[in-house]
Image (cartoon, coloured by chain):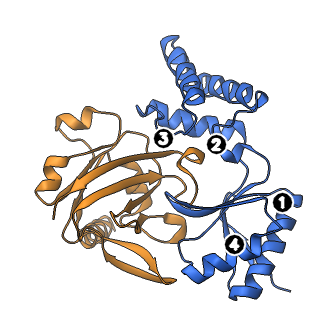
């Protein structure tokens, strides 16, 4: 049963094209606020250092204003199991393959997020459909060069 | 007749506001043949305090808040609590007291601390749906704002 759980977990993580870390030795992991590693981004990796307590959802806004949802458990949108999402203090995603859920002309669509250069908003919130003032939320803007 | 609105988990509305939401949802359904999802309602000061404790304890300086004076007062309450060695529960209670004082003075750190504040899902609407939603809300809600960060309609009844 444990082996099965491990296999299922590994598959989910591979599908999400990301890697996760609970105890990083990286200096930035000491920071308790949300931090996006710009150096890693330039090398094609979205590396997020997270505080111990973080919101339960994640979305990214592209330079053209489109929103991609990556984690919204209630809406069955998950890049990883919610319990794992809640516990990790670092997330690492491959920019080339990172996909999220968006709605185009009302049609739910899953697509690659980082397709053009510009500023991307990394947005964590308990509620992804209300103002940041009205929910536990953390955000950071990163400049991505394609 | 089937209802044309659903409340996202954890959202509750008082009966007066829910009646207005129902009226709006029925009007929108007639125009767009679609239902609406209510994503947030009025928030209590204790719930707001809990969310703000999460932000401040994570090192956030509350820069996202439009009312920076009120945000600074809350940050000060948090810092004072930490300095005094208070527990999470005690600090959250201090933040709640600060928010309650602000409300007494007519200051709302979040629009959802005001009675009648409601958010509705917009992310799955077409441009035509959004136009129809605004039409449906006219005369029912006093304010309709299409927020973009993150996307949703904010209504005040």
Q: Residues within 10 Å of mark 4 (few under 14, many from 20)?
A: some
Distance between mark 1 and mark 2 Cα atoms? 18 Å
Towards the viewer: B83 or B126: B126
Do tags 4 and 2 sit on the same chain? yes
Residue B61: x %, y % from top left: 44, 31
Towards the viewer: A106 or B83: A106
Mark 1, residue position: B17
Q: What residue is at 60 percent from the left and 37 percent from the top?
A: B50
Residue B104: x %, y % from top left: 78, 28
Q: In terms of secondary structure, where does tag 4 sit?
A: helix
Q: Nearer the viewer, mark 4 or mark 2?
A: 4
Distance between mark 3 and mark 4 Cα atoms? 27 Å
Distance between mark 1 and mark 4 Cα atoms? 17 Å
Which chain is disc 3 placed on? B
The chain drawn blue is chain what?
B
Q: In terms of secondary structure, where does tag 2 sit?
A: loop
Mark 3, residue position: B64
Q: What residue is at 36 percent from the left and 55 percent from the top?
A: A121
């Amino acid at each position: 049963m444990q082996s099965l759980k491990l296999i299922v977990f590994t598959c989910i993580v591979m599908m999400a094209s990301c890697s996760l870390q609970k105890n990083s030795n990286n200096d930035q992991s000491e920071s308790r606020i949300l931090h996006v590693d710009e150096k890693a981004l330039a090398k094609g990796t979205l590396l997020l250092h997270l505080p111990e307590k973080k919101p339960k959802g994640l979305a990214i806004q592209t330079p053209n204003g489109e929103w991609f949802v990556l984690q919204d458990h209630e809406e069955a949108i998950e890049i990883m199991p919610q319990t794992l999402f809640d516990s990790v203090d670092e997330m690492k995603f491959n920019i080339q393959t990172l996909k999220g859920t968006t709605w185009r002309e009302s049609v739910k669509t899953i697509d690659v997020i980082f397709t053009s250069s510009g500023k991307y908003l990394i947005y964590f919130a308990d509620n992804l459909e209300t103002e940041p003032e009205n929910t536990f939320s953390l955000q950071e803007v990163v400049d991505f060069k394609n | 007749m089937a209802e044309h609105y659903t409340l996202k988990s954890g959202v509750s509305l008082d009966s007066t506001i829910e009646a207005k939401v129902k009226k709006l949802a029925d009007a929108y359904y007639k125009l767009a043949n679609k239902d609406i999802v209510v994503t947030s309602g009025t928030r209590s000061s204790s719930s707001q305090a809990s969310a703000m404790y999460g932000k401040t304890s994570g090192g956030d300086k509350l820069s996202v808040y439009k009312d920076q004076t009120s945000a600074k007062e809350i940050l000060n309450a948090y810092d004072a609590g930490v300095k005094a060695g208070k527990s999470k529960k005690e600090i959250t209670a201090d933040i709640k007291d600060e928010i309650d004082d602000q409300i007494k003075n007519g200051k709302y750190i979040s629009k959802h601390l005001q009675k009648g504040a409601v958010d509705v899902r917009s992310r799955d609407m077409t441009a035509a749906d959004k136009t129809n939603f605004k039409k449906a809300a006219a005369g029912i809600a006093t304010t309709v704002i299409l927020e973009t960060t993150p996307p949703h309609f904010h209504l005040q009844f």
